[in-house]
Image: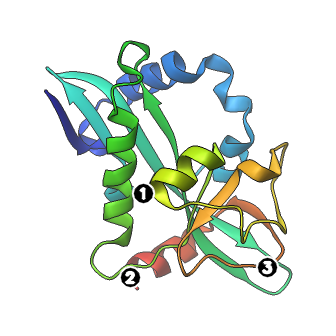
Amino acid sequence: MITLVPLANINPTAVEMLLDAAFGPDRFTRTAYTIRGGAKPVAALSFAAVEDGTLVGSIQCWPIALVAEDRMVSLIMLGPVAVAPGHQGDGIGRRLMAQALDAATGEGLDHALMLIGDPEYYGRFFGFSAERTGRWNAPGPVERHRLLARGDAVPDNAGMLGPRLAESIRATASA
């Protein structure tokens, strides 16, 4: 039986091994890593899937921002969603996404959420679209149609995606 638990309960080395198995050791070269910068994942929105004491899946969510000339808009970046190769196709990734989305929209919160992913999948099952991201820029290569967002607070303006400053993380957490 698969159980979802807070990712903070899992050994970080096990999480890194899962990410390597799911995405390969070159995963650090991806644009998503540059966008997140050196931030730590948002613990309340990051989860693990465990089966018989073994980590078989994880999702991490990150504090990022869309920075325009005159303002910074706080966003939460979902992903990566990692599933152990032997468990891919079992619905674990979908369960992890649903858990993170429930946490992000629960208790009256209205986080602006974004991810880089397959528009057909994330649109169909989770309501993400590229409708408001057309003028966003990323600090590396990204296929524009895979830059997706969801939520009423998602900005529809130009800007550069990047890590959120520490002081704005504290302000968001206390809001």
Who comes first in sequence, dot 1 or dot 3? 1
> Residue 129, relative to residue 81: is it above or below?
below
**Residue for point 35% across, 52% down:** 98
Residue 6 visible at all:
yes
**Residue for point 44% across, 79% down:** 110
Q: Is residue 35 left or right of residue 20?
A: right
Q: Position of residue 42 (x, y in %)?
A: 42, 57
* Between 108 and 45, the one nearer to me in the picture: 108
Amino acid identity at mark 3: Asn
**Residue for point 79% across, 79% down:** 157
* Residue 174 numbered tag: 2
**Residue for point 74% across, 61% down:** 161
Q: Position of residue 158 (x, y in %)?
A: 84, 74
* Residue 161 numbered tag: none
* Residue 157 numbered tag: 3
Q: Are marks 2 and 1 in contact (CB under 8 Å)?
A: no
* Between 148 and 22, the one nearer to me in the picture: 148
**Image quadrant where one finds the N terminus:** top left
Amino acid identity at mark 1: Val
**Mark 1: secondary structure:** loop
In this view, which residue lies farthest toward the top? 86
> Residue 32, relative to residue 77: is it above or below?
above
Q: Is residue 22 left or right of residue 157?
A: left
Q: CA distance from mark 1 to mark 3?
A: 25 Å
* Mark 1 Cα-neighbour bin, 10 Å: few <14, some 14–19, many ≥20: some
* Between 120 and 163, the one nearer to me in the picture: 120
Looking at the picture, the colour scheme in use is rainbow
Residue 40 visible at all:
no
Q: Nearer the viewer, mark 1 or mark 3?
A: 3
